[in-house]
Image (cartoon, rainbow, N blue to C red):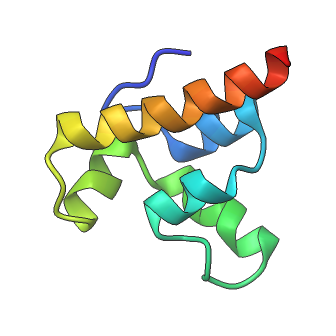
């Protein structure tokens, strides 16, 4: 999956499943229960999360890509 600024968090989670480290990166891990988190991730793009966390967009995309790659490597093992 190519991660871009327009990628929705929900799409990443749909592809790779619940990833606590990624949810934490987006700052939604402590917000309510599972249903609330799922709802919020449908609204949040990678660009939005970068802005909210005051991190340069490219740096944030790299962090997300790194988390996704770790998940892919875990699938292979």
Residue shown at 22% from the left, 39% from the top? 59
User: How many numbered discs sit on the rendered protein?
Assistant: 0
The quadrant in which the C terminus is found is top right
In the figure, is residue 63 to the left or right of 27?
A: left
Q: Nearer the viewer, residue 13 or 71?
A: 71
The image quarter containing residue 46 is: top left
Q: Is residue 9 above or below residue 74?
A: below
The quadrant in which the N terminus is found is top right
Residue shown at 54% from the left, 38% from the top? 67
Q: Is residue 45 above or below residue 2?
A: below
In the figure, is residue 59 to the left or right of 3?
A: left
The image quarter containing residue 6 is: top left
Q: Is residue 10 above or below residue 54?
A: above
In the figure, is residue 65 to the left or right of 56?
A: right
Residue shown at 14% from the left, 47% from the top? 56
Residue shown at 43% from the left, 24% from the top? 3
């Amino acid at each position: 999956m190519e991660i871009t600024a327009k990628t929705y968090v929900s799409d990443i989670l749909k592809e790779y499943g619940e990833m606590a480290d990624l949810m934490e990166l987006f700052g939604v891990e402590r917000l309510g229960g599972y249903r609330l988190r799922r709802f919020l991730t449908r609204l949040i793009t990678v660009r939005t999360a970068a802005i909210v966390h005051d991190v340069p967009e490219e740096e944030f995309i790299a962090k997300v890509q790194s988390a996704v790659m770790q998940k892919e490597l875990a699938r292979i093992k």
